[in-house]
Amino acid sequence: MVSEKKYPMTASGKKKLEEELEFLKTVKRKEVVERIKIARSYGDLSENSEYDSAKEDQAFVEGKISSLESMIRNSVIITEDEMNTDEVQLGKTVTFKELPDGDEETYTIVGSAEANPIEGLISNDSPIAKGLIGRSKGDEVKILTPGGEMSVVIVEIK
């Protein structure tokens, strides 16, 4: 039997996924069904672009619901008491400075299910997180990114 992928995440990340799932099930699904009903009322479905569009949206919504249900069912919550306070790991916020004279950047390392780089949440599967995990404050780290190698020093871990 193949085991399903585990999705490490924070409790707040799981809550966001549950809220999104609830919205898709209670609001978005009903909207799409209503669009399909209206499009069907136009008659011939073979040349009905509104019907085709609504069916595509329905497939997308149902796929997203299925994906979210799987992530929630297979979530592994990272708790504060499991964390080592001295090293970078999942659930930690790390500030680093690119060497030799770059700006400081701060990211929280989260599971892939809740990653959002624009909000400062990077996946534990990302090259930056992989390079930082297990390191401590003051460590100089070389990170191989798609854009090339970068050197950073870890300034703070929270």
Image (spheres, rainbow, N blue to C red):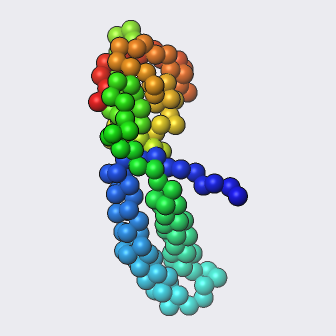
70 to 148, vertically: above or below: below
Q: Nearer the viewer, residue 30 or 81?
A: 81
The residue drawn where x is 36% and y is 74% is 27
Q: Where on the picture, by quarter, is residue 158?
A: top left
Whether residue 149 can be seen here: yes
20 to 129, vertically: above or below: below
66 to 37, vertically: above or below: above
The residue drawn where x is 47% and y is 37% is 124
Q: Furthest-top residue in view?
A: 100
14 to 143, vertically: above or below: below
Q: Position of residue 12 (x, y in %)?
A: 32, 51
Q: Nearer the viewer, residue 76 or 62?
A: 76
| Horizontal side, residue 85 vs residue 73: left or right | left
Q: Position of residue 10 (x, y in %)?
A: 37, 47
Q: Where on the picture, by quarter, is residue 34?
A: bottom left
| Horizontal side, residue 26 vs residue 146: left or right | left
Q: Position of residue 51 (x, y in %)?
A: 54, 79
Q: Can you say which quadrant of the picture contains the N terminus?
A: bottom right
Q: Position of residue 110 (x, y in %)?
A: 41, 41
The residue drawn where x is 40% and y is 14% is 139
Q: Where on the picture, by quarter, is residue 138?
A: top left
Q: Furthest-front residue in view?
A: 81
User: How many numbered dots are placed on residues in this image?
Assistant: 0
